[in-house]
């Protein structure tokens, strides 16, 4: 049997979803990946089939060309299961003819379609996408994977899906053996860490403003940001703003990192002041696995994981509340320890890569005619 993963980038699949390929092989599937091929999956027991993905290419001609390429792959390979990950791969998979394959449609967040204040055209695209996806789920051998319950409600659009058509995923999960709880750094300053693409929806500008306020009040605190600008994303932070952060006292930009676990063990507090559009951010799972308390905002995905026992949740777009939560943790080492330990326990219970792979395997069994 064959399973075809449809995803924009092969490196993204490797960094977030390699455990799904491992589980698929364990379940007896030959693994194919339709993605932009950078060679990231070389040496793995998979075949990568090149797709002309360009995330900013949203025009009808570009979408038509990408759909035709995916259709050619489906016609040639005849997969038994197609597992599409994220908005654009889902759209292309629904537009293509499945040729008898079951479909697992993994909504990993709604991105800029869910943001307040987004351009009017995003609302039109979002409405079209929701109706198309909801219609696809009326077809046999098709299931929806979501990372938070609000995304499920949005897809349903007031018309509830049968329970066997929806599975809740623990995001991409986290490798609990690679991300190990460790004591926080000793001494000062208190370091707040962010691991994120530099895009507006992540709210990094609010974290910069919050830490600047706390430093003005005399708190010895630093904000350390790991990640690069994502020029393919329509929300990427402009170079001038990034350079402004770079010269802000107490702000450190370390760029893209390869050892994320070491980053989290080098900080005291994890932060992601998201404006929305999340599924379940993996950076939060990784920080929690390392025993770091989290400060985030009340957006779907973030609040679903953090709740009131793995960190502090603040209102979105509220710099004062964000600064207050960071200050509370900065001044209370015991609270940091308690919330960090609770977050680690939560990951071990329900949010590992094994949990994610088990849910995906259940979806494949449902759409391939299993139980």
Image: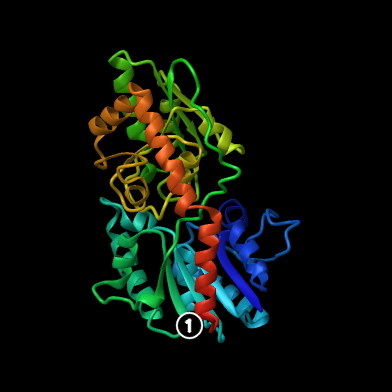
Residue 63 in view here: yes
| Spot occupied by residue 368 in the image (x, y as percentages of width and height) | 55, 81
| Spot occupied by residue 140 in the image (x, y as percentages of width and height) | 44, 85
| Spot occupied by residue 214 in the image (x, y as percentages of width and height) | 31, 20
User: Does residue 184 sit above or below 24 in this rendering?
Assistant: above
| Spot occupied by residue 275 in the image (x, y as percentages of width and height) | 32, 46
Q: Which residue is mark 1?
A: 141
Disc count in the image?
1
Q: How is the image coloured?
A: rainbow
| In front of the other: 38 or 210 | 210
User: Does residue 361 sit above or below 306 in this rendering?
Assistant: below
Q: Which residue is farthest right?
A: 43
Seen in the image, is 5 located left or right of residue 280?
right
Seen in the image, is 284 located left or right of residue 46?
left
| In front of the other: 274 or 239 | 274
Q: Residue at x 65, y 76 (%)?
A: 2
Could you say whether the residue bearing mark 1 is in a helix, strand or loop?
loop
Q: Residue at x 50, y 58 (%)?
A: 55
Report the quarter where the N terminus lies: bottom right
Q: Which residue is farthest top?
A: 218
Q: Residue at x 50, y 28 (%)?
A: 253
| In front of the other: 270 or 358 | 358
Residue 293 in view here: no
Q: Residues within 10 Å of mark 1 (few under 14, many from 20)?
A: many
Q: Residue at x 46, y 48 (%)?
A: 347
User: Does residue 277 sit above or below 163 in this rendering?
Assistant: above
């Amino acid at each position: 049997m064959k399973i075809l993963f449809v995803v924009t980038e092969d490196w993204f699949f490797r960094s977030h979803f390699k455990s799904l390929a491992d589980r698929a092989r364990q379940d007896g599937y030959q693994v194919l990946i339709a993605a932009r091929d950078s060679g990231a999956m070389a040496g793995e027991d998979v075949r990568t089939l090149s797709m002309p993905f360009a995330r900013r290419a949203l025009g009808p001609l570009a979408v038509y060309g990408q759909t035709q390429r995916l259709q050619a792959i489906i016609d040639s390979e005849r997969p038994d299961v197609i597992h599409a990950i994220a908005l654009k791969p889902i759209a292309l998979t629904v537009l293509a003819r499945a040729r008898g394959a079951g479909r697992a449609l993994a909504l990993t967040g709604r991105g800029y379609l869910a943001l307040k204040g987004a351009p009017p055209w995003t609302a039109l695209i979002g409405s079209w996408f929701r109706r198309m996806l909801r219609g696809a789920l009326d077809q046999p051998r098709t299931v929806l994977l979501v990372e938070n319950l609000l995304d499920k409600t949005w897809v349903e659009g007031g018309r509830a899906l049968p329970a066997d058509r929806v599975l809740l995923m623990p995001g991409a999960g986290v490798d609990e053996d690679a991300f190990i709880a460790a004591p926080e750094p000793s001494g000062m300053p208190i370091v707040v860490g962010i691991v994120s693409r530099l895009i507006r929806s992540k709210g990094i500008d609010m974290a910069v403003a919050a830490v600047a306020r706390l430093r003005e009040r005399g708190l010895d605190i630093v904000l350390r940001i790991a990640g690069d600008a994502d020029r393919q994303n329509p929300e990427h932070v402009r170079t001038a703003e990034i350079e402004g952060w770079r010269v802000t006292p107490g702000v450190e930009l370390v760029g893209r990192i390869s050892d994320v676990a070491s980053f989290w063990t080098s900080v005291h507090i994890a932060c992601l002041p998201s404006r929305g559009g999340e599924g379940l951010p993996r950076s939060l799972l990784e920080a929690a696995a390392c025993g770091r308390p989290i400060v985030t905002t009340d957006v779907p995905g973030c609040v679903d994981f953090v709740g009131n026992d793995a960190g502090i949740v603040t209102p979105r777009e509220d710099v004062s509340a964000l600064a207050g939560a960071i200050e509370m943790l900065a001044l209370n080492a015991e609270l940091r320890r308690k919330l960090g330990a609770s977050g680690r326990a939560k990951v071990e219970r329900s949010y590992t890569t094994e949990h994610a792979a088990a849910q995906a395997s259940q979806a494949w069994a449902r759409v391939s005619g299993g139980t």
